[in-house]
Image (cartoon, grey):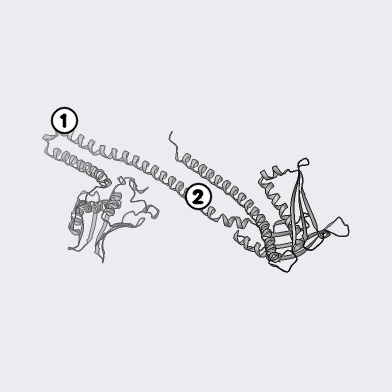
Amino acid sequence: MKLSLKHIVILVIIALTVIFAYQAYWLIGLYSTMQSKIKSDIRETVRLCDYDEMFYRIDILRKEKKRKHGRMDISVEVNAKEHSTTVKNKSQLKDHTEDDNYITSTEVPNLDMSTMLRNPKGIMQFEIYMQQGIHSGLDLMKNINVKYFNKLLNRRLDSLGINTPHRLLYIHNYKKNGNKKVLTKILSSFGEANYEYTDTVKLAIDPDKSYSYILLLPPTKTVVIRQMSGILATSLIILVILMFVFWYLIRTIMKQKTLDEMKSDFTNNMTHELKTPIAVAYAANDVLLNFNGINDAQKTKKYLSITQKELKRLSYLVEQILSMSMEKRKTMSLKFEDVNVITVVHHLVAQQKLKADKPVDITIDIKNDLTIKTDKSHFSNIISNLLDNAVKYSKEKAVIKITANHYDDFIEIDITDHGIGIERDKQKYIFDKFYRVPHGNVQNVKGYGLGLYYVKSIMDKFHGSIDVESEPSKGTTFKLRFNG
């Protein structure tokens, strides 16, 4: 099934939309996952900093030789019937009596130990309970060093890529005089107070949850987006590449479609043009053979002249087609030699004046000793094609000027006419294969869109260039540049 360009464009748009939607869905999912991870990492960072702060105090206690050391025991009791676990902590200072013991406990209800140890979240929760148990004993021996905790926290947040302002609070929740209402007292605070914080991380550090760390943070989305910057940039580049590839595909298809249409027009036009001289020559020859035209010398000369003219025309058409065929071959050989420019131009001008169907006035401004190292045959074809166009697209009389100048590193040949000209927006297409400039007022000009394509192709093989300057109704100048 052959798809039209419209359907291809629709399919490309659908494909791009699906790719973009999937990419967006994947990025949104990744963003949510990374945001959850960064929040989890922050909570774990606070907990680990608390661990480090406790071991910091324990290390200090070990180094204090004259200090009365204490003892802290932690036990875990499991009630299999009630499916509960109790973490008990007992702290005692040396040389103190049993009355100086401090016992705290925390209970984990409705969860048996085996289930807890099989569940990663349960293990984490159990660690927190153990941590709180250590706190309850250690805090009696040595006060919390919140300043050191904040120092550790800043360092670890930086390692996570969170270098935005944040605020740390160390608070105490308590009830006063048997009042049921819980009051909060800020014991220590660090960081900027006058800042917009949206995210909160809380860590209770004792079994009763009366003492807690609270970390206030701005939105973590900026941190996540910064961490995703490489993925976002890569996704954008891939999307741009895909859009460029699809655009280039559509552009190529459109060019191929245009080229196919031009080739069809060329085939139809060329078929008609080939049939015309054959039919005319056949008719003239038929008159001579079958209607005793050969006995009339004047009539014989007339019909032979018609036959010769049409055969020349047919030969020219075949030559154009063969030139295109030869040019297309990569192995096409060029024979470079020193060619006298004015000799070639004089010969071609004489031909134009003989075959032109309108008055022709051609001025030549070329030095007699100017030579170009080029292929003489193809060079002649280039000049001939440009002169043909100058004559065909002139009005009642063709006024043409041919000039050549030798500059420092190149030779330029200009062919200028005063014909109908070429519109600016059409000039970039005139060297394309099979392209013909649409002229509403010059419908009778014959052509196949091959001449200028041939000229441009050969100039490229000469390592030269061709440019055009033209204004509608004022004329056209083609500039040929050859390496000097």
Q: Is residue 192 visible?
A: no
Q: Could you tell which of marks 1 and 2 lies nearer the N-terminus?
A: 2
Is 229 placed left or right of 325 in the picture?
Answer: right
Farthest residue toward the top? 290
Q: Quadrant of the N terminus?
A: top left
Q: Quadrant of residue 281?
A: top left
Q: Amino acid at mark 2?
A: Leu
Q: Is residue 155 visible?
A: yes
Q: Position of residue 305 (x, y in %)?
A: 17, 41
To which residue does mark 2 refer?
239
Give above or below for 266 relative to 145: above
Q: Amino acid at mark 1?
A: Asn
Which of the pair 449/185 is nearer the observer?
185
Is 159 placed left or right of 267 in the picture?
Answer: right
Q: Position of residue 280 (x, y in %)?
A: 22, 37
Q: Position of residue 420 (x, y in %)?
A: 33, 53
* Mark 1 to mark 2 CA distance (whole Å): 75 Å
Q: Position of residue 184 (x, y in %)?
A: 80, 60
Q: Quadrant of residue 446?
A: top left
Mark linked to residue 290: 1
Give the foreground label among 1 and 2: 2
Q: Quadrant of residue 470?
A: bottom left
Mark 2 residue element: helix
Q: Quadrant of the C terminus?
A: bottom left
Farthest residue toward the bottom? 66
Which of the pair 479/141 is nearer the observer?
141
Crowd tier of the residue under label 2, counting other residues whose Cα lies within 10 Å: few below 14, some 14–19, many 20 or above? some
Is 418 placed left or right of 242 in the picture?
Answer: left
Mark 1 residue element: helix
Is 214 placed left or right of 283 in the picture?
Answer: right
